[in-house]
Image (cartoon, grey):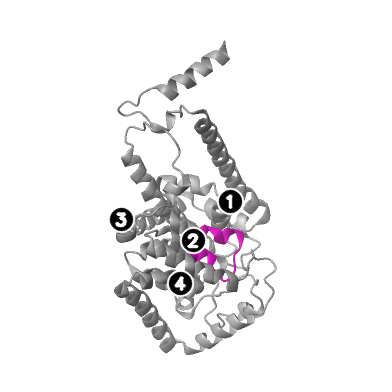
Amino acid sequence: MSVLSNRGMAASLATASPRHGELGWLRLPSDRRQLRLRAVRDGLIVAGLLAAVFVLVVIPSFGRSLGYDALAYWAVDPADVYGRTLQSQYALGGFRYAPPLALAASLLHSLPWWLFLWCWLAGMAAALLYLGGRWALILLALPPVALEIEQGNVHLLMAVAIVMGFRWPWTWSFVLLTKVTPGIGLLWFAVRREWRSLAIALGFTVAVCVGSLAVAPQLWSDWLRALSVNAGQSQEFSIPPPLWVRLPLAALLVAWGARTDRPWTVGVAAMLALPLIWPHSLALALAAVPFLRHRAAARRQADPDGSRRRFITLRELLGSDAEAARLGGPSPWRALALAAGCLVVALVIAVLAGSELPFALYSMSRLIVPPGA
């Protein structure tokens, strides 16, 4: 009897006409194939969220590895910025980015490690909210995203800079000064003959570099030497193929996307163009998500009453989107507002938690924290 009643409930949900205020996600598809696809989708999301809890809570609790990469941005020694990087590209705390960012990062060491890590995690949460919107929790179910937050790298922030770069081209300087080669995404402006945007992106980057060269010229020679030393080291732990194979493919992808009004290609191409790809590096491709969200929203507007009740196909999702190509992604002011909001919440929690928060963060990252930090 209970089986029959469950089937009847499912049938009523599947066939009920949508009413004002009804939650769309409660309506089950009437087609059996679509119903199975939804079950698989929801199951994968739940499994991914459980994996995210394991990555963000269990692994740091036992491995003490929370903020493993973020340590490099906090522990910059102005007297020897690239010393650890010259030893090995895998050196803990080795800073690998261009001198302008090294000068900025050197100011962060004045903060206690636990406070820096807490604020850094808040910034990553803001980046995920900006990129994902209502999809943010679903994106957290992707293993590379959870790993990125646990490691504390800059790929999510780079993704935000890429999306913001469609409206504020100068944000591309962050991409160029961190991983360098993902700047291949600037071909978008060149192919579309948006010369003003390209000039702003490159001009701002050059201006920042000239300023840092005037302040600390020695850092540039040290950085270039560190790059050459790292390039000659083994890359056996990175995801193949090597950069010389991926970079032309990334350029072709951006050029195709620029000609066919597919802005999502820029983020994917930037990820392909990374010097080295680690599992968490795949999070950079999230720069495509705001444009895919725009496509999905357009499809919902074309079917406001949900009469089709089917999944959007991959072809629909990745199709041409002239409006998004012209307007860019979400407003950059939204990113700044989210960052400010997450930072305020993080600081309030830090104040209310008192000594318990530093202890909790130390316990999850103490293997990587220098003595006395």
Of circles 2 and 1, the one toward us is 2
Query: x, y (%) of residue 279?
Result: 61, 59
Of circles 3 and 4, the one toward us is 3
- Which class describes the residues within 10 Å of circle 1: few (<14), some (14-19), or many (20+)? some
Q: CA distance from mark 2 to mark 3?
A: 19 Å
Residue with the mark numbered 2? 268
Earlier sequence position, callout 2 versus callout 3: 2
Residue with the mark numbered 4? 183
- At label 2, the amino acid type is Val
Pointers 1 and 3 in contact (C-beta within 8 Å):
no
Query: x, y (%) of residue 3?
Result: 57, 15
Residue with the mark numbered 1? 143
Question: What range of the chain is rendered magenta?
Answer: 268-284
Q: SS for tag 4?
A: helix
Vertical order, 363 against 217 (above or below): above
Q: Can you tell which mark lies on residue 323?
A: 3
**Quadrant holding the C terminus:** bottom right
Vertical order, 250 against 233 (above or below): above
